[in-house]
Amino acid sequence: MPEGDTVWLSAKRMHEALAGKVLTRSDFRVPSLATVDLSGLTVTAVRARGKHMLTALSDGRILHTHFRMDGTWHLYKPGDRWRGGPDWQVRVVLENASWQAVGYRLPVVELVSSAEEAVGHLGPDLLAEDWDPDEALRRLRADPAREIGMALLDQRLLAGLGNLYRCEVLFLRGLTPWVLVGDVPDLPALVEKGHRLMLANRDRWEQSTTGSLRRGEDHWVFERAGKPCRRCGTRIVSAAQGEAPYERLTYWCPRCQLGPAPAPSRPSSPRPLGRTRYTP
């Protein structure tokens, strides 16, 4: 699933291509909007909110789209060949005199009357101009018995953070994902680390938490199960956390990160891994 910084950058590119320009054509390929025609309307802004994209129109309506697992928007010049996938995966097309915006595999495509209707349930957005860390901390602390790894993924608490960043932030703060929110020694520092990592990556498609953009060197633990920790050499392990449909595969270093942990999906060494003792 794309992280909030990916959606932020997509919205920025879409805003540059569409905002202030009149739509010459729209093509909705979802049943609920199949007869809708937006031609003649002006796109006034395209903004990201968490993992949601909001395309504001001059008649007051907003096109709300969500990427979820593999949705994406592509921009093409008129006459260019579309390369985002087969035509049957296209869900919506917005076109002006200079650009074609093509939405592929978008599971959410709807027209709403206000941003509140689409994203009012979200917590503070880590990449928004109105980012409110105090409100994010208040929401996180409301359930101190929740596992921090799952709390960080809850978009109602803070919006935009996904599986990649929660794994990397917890490694950098030295905590396993199963530490309870109430036992996190410095929750403000953990949230600020997530904020800073996303800010550092929002203007590029590559996502690096190590400072290196070289392939294979860009992450500390995410998707590195079985590989040596970049700090201590212990093999990175992985295990599922959460219950369906919110279950996610999480990654951690059993030596650098303190706290409770289940048996990993892959052993970190020839000997079975036990639970790590953690004292807040």
Image (spheres, helix red, strand yellow):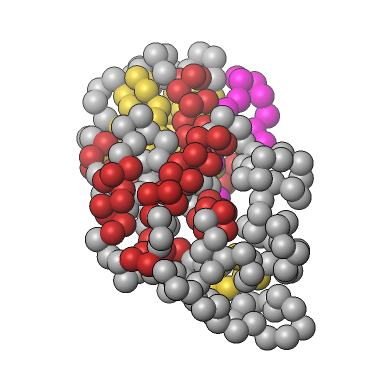
Bounds of the magenta segment: 68-83
Q: Is residue 280 magenta?
A: no
The residue nearer to you, when weighing 88 against 136, is 136
Name the residue nearer the viewer: 238 or 94. Answer: 238
Q: Residue at x 35, y 29 (%)?
A: 129
Tell me which secondary structure the magenta stretch mostly adopts.
loop
- For the point 25% across and 22% down, the residue is 59
Q: Position of residue 249 (x, y in %)?
A: 56, 67
- Residue at horizontal 72%, vertical 69%? 235
Quarter that holds the C terminus = bottom left
The relative height of residue 26 versus residue 270 in the rendered view (above or below) is above
Whether residue 72 is situated above or below residue 176 in the rendered picture? above
Q: Is residue 222 left or right of residue 98?
A: right
Q: Quadrant of residue 251?
A: bottom right
Vertical side of 170 occupied by 260: above or below: below
- Magenta span contains residue 79: yes
Image mark count: 0
